[in-house]
Image (cartoon, helix red, strand yellow):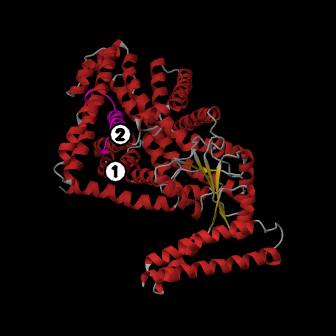
Amino acid sequence: MDILFFQPTLYLLAMVVAVPLASRLGLGSVLGYLAAGIVIGPVFGLVGSENVDLQHVAEFGVVLMLFLIGLELDPRALWKMRKKLLGLGGLQIVLTTAVIFAVGLALNLSWQVALTAGLALSLSSTAIVLQTLTEKQLLQTSGGRGAFAVLLMQDIAVIPILAFLPLLALPAARALAERMRDDHAAMNFLQDLPGWGVTLVTLAAVATVALVGHFLVRPAYRFVHSARLREIQTAFALLIVVSIAALMTLVGLSPALGTFLAGVILANSEFRHELESDIAPFKGLLLGLFFVTVGSGMDLDLLLDKPLKVMVLTLALMFFKGAILYALGWLFSIKGRNRWLFTLSIAQAGEFGFVLTSFAVAQRILPIPTAQMLVLVITLSMLLTPLFFVAYDRFTRRMEEQGTTEADEIDDKQSIIIAGVGRFGQVVNRMVTQSGFRTTVLDPDLRTIEVMRTFGFKGFVGDPTRPDLLKAAGFDTARVLVICFDDPKKALQLTKYARRLRPDIHIIARAYDREHVFQLYQAGANDIVREYFDSSLRVARYVLESMGLSEYEAYELQKLFFELDRASVRELASVWRPGVPMDKNPDYVARAKELNRDLESALLNHMSRDGSQGD
């Protein structure tokens, strides 16, 4: 009983102390989890053989994470991503495997071992990368989306890789595996089958998950939901994931891939959001525990025995993988700092490498010493990844300080373009998008865009006054251009340019003051909004209500003032002269006084009319 309470206390204490410290130092939570594991494991030896059993439990965090990722992916969205999945992701796996395969042959490994190592090391860490990209609000950048596409393709590729690996086992190795079989039903079942039989079992398991998810889960969830007990709904959500994971494990497949597939199938279901809210807390805690167990399970004896070899292999892996990723980023037009983000974020090996390595050992493809070295290289590369994100942050910050921030690659063209998304533009964007319309948002300030992404809104870093970026945002086909700049000069510049190129586009512009209104009017803006005009009218309405007018009377006066003032601005535009201060323009002053008298008279007449009607 003492051990039962001591071990969870130890792991939780390490997480609670290390993760906040790492976050405060800007290192991210993943590095904190890994560091906590290293401290309680290899450094102080506070954990023992139970770490292996705990890691199997903690791996369920990866399973839950992939299920949640699948829930976010509409199958139609996957079809739209097919070019990036097959092109960017597929090429990354093939090229990385080919390079590592060649290096393995050069190191006198058998071709089966070299190919298995290439396949295992070609996969990156979905858990670390997605967790860190989400924390740093980088998932919506073009580099983040490119990394996500590669990770998604890698996750999908695990299915055929696991089906393919048994074909690499030599007949003598398979015979040895049969003699050394244990009582594990799944392993006995698989080892009794030839390689092609394992492949058929794999495909049958995937098909079963697809059919069950599509035809049985929905009616079952409606039945459970009728009880209206939250804990039962949570239990059912966990049952879905655990049962699919059990099926995948039974046939020797990765449970994470099965649950990912189930998530994709349920992405369009009416209870998707409830599933997410039920499972998310379990995912976060178990995923953190997974990283702790990775750190605590490091073989420091092997590292201390052959430190140079381990570090050279790890850095060589990340260098070659990074070089391939950088070249693919260039080939697929991921530009500037986004290409560096794409390269640095997925240059490591990942948790599926552990899965493939252990599976290859069970199939007698990998010798145990080679597998131990692979596990250590994978772990160290995962450990270095948060440091790569820190390097990227400093690189980006230096670019900002030097004024050399590069624009995002814009791959989303909508009918509404919002140029500038400060306090003014954010309100516009929120109302438009939450009313069911899609927008393309451009702003030159990286921090502003990152704040947007934090709250789930998509935006791109870039100066909308640049013709190339405006064109990339879909200006040629857009219906509405909303100009929300704080800078009046930039707003006027963009209005003139947009009207010259697109006489048919509807331009809505934010104006700094009345003179700016006249400038935008002459430049061709269709609708012009003075930035403080509407809020000032609301304040005036509250004043009138405080003085005894009814809410309806105050609203009617506000509405009348708004209409008459807009009409007066149009008239004053005809006598306004550019470059001449308004108070130095006699025609403007005379006309403004006349219009003010008319406005006052109209408001008083309206009040007296309402008052007489009330009598």
Regarding mark 2 in the picture, which secondary structure is present there? loop
Q: Is residue 382 above or below residue 353?
A: below
Q: Is residue 246 left or right of residue 499?
A: left
Residue at 63%, 71% in the rendered image: 565
Badge 1 density bin: few <14, some 14–19, many ≥20, Cα 10 Å: some
Task: Residue 296 in the image: state x and y as whole percent.
Answer: 38, 47
- Where residue 534 sits, quadrant-wise, is bottom right
User: Among all residues in the image, which is located at the extreme bottom?
Assistant: 547
Q: Quadrant of the N terminus?
A: bottom left
Which residue is painted at 57% across and 38% down in the image? 315
Left of 445 or right of it: where is 80?
left
Disc nearer the start of the sequence (1/2): 2
In this rendered view, identify the residue nearer to me: 480 or 419.
480
Over which residues does the magenta segment extend?
250-271
Q: Would you name the residue on which mark 1 appears?
A: 280
Q: Position of residue 361 (x, y in %)?
A: 36, 26
Q: Position of residue 328 (x, y in %)?
A: 61, 32
Mark 1 lies on a secondary structure that is helix
Q: 278 or 281: which is nearer to us?
A: 278
What type is the residue that disc 2 sits on? Asn
Is 613 a magenta residue? no
Q: Nearer the viewer, mark 1 or mark 2?
A: 2
- Residue 268 on the magenta segment: yes
Q: Is residue 403 left or right of residue 104?
A: right
Residue on which the image places disc 2:
268
